[in-house]
Amino acid sequence: MARRPSRRDIIALSTLGAAVLQMASVRAAQSRRKPNLLFIWTDEQRADTMAAYGNRKIHAPNLNKLASESVIFERGYVSQPVCTPSRSTVMTGLWPHASGLTANNIPLPTETRCLPELLGDGGYRTAYMGKWHLGDEIFAQHGFAEWVSMEDGYRKHYRPGRDRSARSDYHRFLLEKGYAPAEDGTFSRAFAARRPIEHCKPKFLEQKACEFLRRHRDKPFMLYINFLEPHMPFFGPLDAEHDPDEIDLPGNFADPLEENEPLRYRTLRERHRARYGTDEQSIRKLIARYYGLVTQVDLSVGAILKTLDDLGLAEDTIVVYTSDHGDMMGSHHMVEKSVMYEEAVRVPWLMRIPRMKGGSKRVGQPVSHIDMVPTLLDLMGAKSRPALPGQSLVPLILGKRVGEDHVFIEWNPGAGATQKVEGADVSAAEEERRRVAGERTRSIIAPDGWKLCLSDKDKCQLFNLKQDPGETRNLFDSGRYSEVIGRLSKRIRRWQERTGDAVELPT
């Protein structure tokens, strides 16, 4: 016969039960811990610069490892293929034409909110480090309590009242290392890129980021780090990291850009060929140096992620890796960006989300940076969701559908491309060149692979990306695809109506 529990047994059981409940409560609290955000992005990094996007020659082991643990958006697109407009979308969740940041060096209005302000949670420690390019470059703003500045070349674009004699944190770092600035009192990007690797910008940002993580290991944080590399000047301490003779030229390197392609693009190519060379070996050397800059970033990304692991923060931290736009880097014999070709508008986009177990997952549907802020607000448990034009991609990550499965990209005029290069093979009147320099384009990419680019002043384009991934055959004027053009044109116009875009496009 079982013994009746004594008073001591009852007390012991009660104590044990209380301990179990307390442990369960602690675990529940831990599981409800606010997720940290580590947002790492680069400048001018095209998608095919890591193994996850098909490039196994580039040396990027840390990015490859991150991809193996992340959601990989195979077809991630920017809102506009140039710095300031694209950055404005990533930070605010607004289209460039809606925020007003349609060209470089337009300052982000103080009343336009970035992610920390949109989340509205004062419990987070916030920091922005690196290139900003949204106005008042070296001054803390938009919900970021800590600010590590790196660029001094935007002084003339500061708002009235800002101290143009102030210098960046990286400037002071170089002074501490014993370097003397140029006659204008600054260190140029070219000077910085020629320093030993431990004095270059990526290592500087790496050190600052790791210090931040150590200081805030016990508090929720949002840390944005923006590397300048692999942006021009397209050289650095790892120029010899990749052998030019082993570099594969883009498959569309020799595309002649026929007269049915936009005149603005053909004019840009004149400038690029004059600046970077016309022969294959010159482009191979350029690509090799560009790859070296990606490797330089990769080293610093690896150090930052290792610090995150060493501090035991990885399981509570969402990690994002992307870029503000790509680079042609020899495709269509062009370099730089500012065009609608895939190499300029498509970027790497990785999201490591620890609470979504299962390792790497590939998402093949085209997605847009306009959805970045809504997705992060969703993942970070925002109590209120501001009215934004994008959508959360969390359902897509979970294998479900989202409301918009087409991607839209815009181009608005900024720096013109009107210069005529002596000896160039594009014949067009200067008046026509000036006219198309101010062209506006609205593009759409459909999940079935069709891509339509409508320009208000220049040639329009239609590509079948599944059959012609290099975009070497513009089908717009072929007369065979009126149904596709009509269908996608209607979608562009519905998007314009929905987002308040008043650009008049051809009918």
Image (tube, helix red, strand yellow):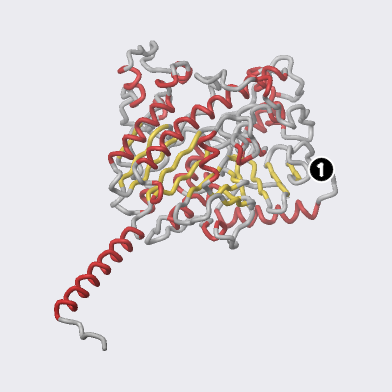
Q: Looking at the rendering, in which quadrant would you find the N terminus? A: bottom left
Within the image, what quadrant is residue 146 found in?
top left
Residue in the picture at 33% in, 26% down: 169
Q: Would you name the residue on which mark 1 appears?
A: 477
Q: Is residue 95 left or right of residue 6?
A: right
Mark 1: secondary structure: loop
Q: Is residue 166 left or right of residue 366?
A: left
- The residue sitting at the front extreme is 1
Q: Residues within 10 Å of mark 1 (few under 14, many from 20)?
A: few
- The residue sitting at the left extreme is 7
x then y, percent, for residue 452: 71, 46
Residue in the picture at 61% in, 55% down: 495
x then y, percent, for residue 234: 55, 22
Residue toward you, 49 or 280: 49
Within the image, what quadrant is residue 186 found in?
top left
Is residue 439 shown above or below 423?
below
Residue 201 visible in the current orientation: yes
Query: Disc 1 residue type?
Result: Asp
Q: Is residue 437 left or right of residue 168?
A: right
Residue toward you, 360 or 344: 360
x then y, percent, for residue 103: 52, 36
Residue 267 visible in the current orientation: no
Residue toward you, 212 or 143: 212
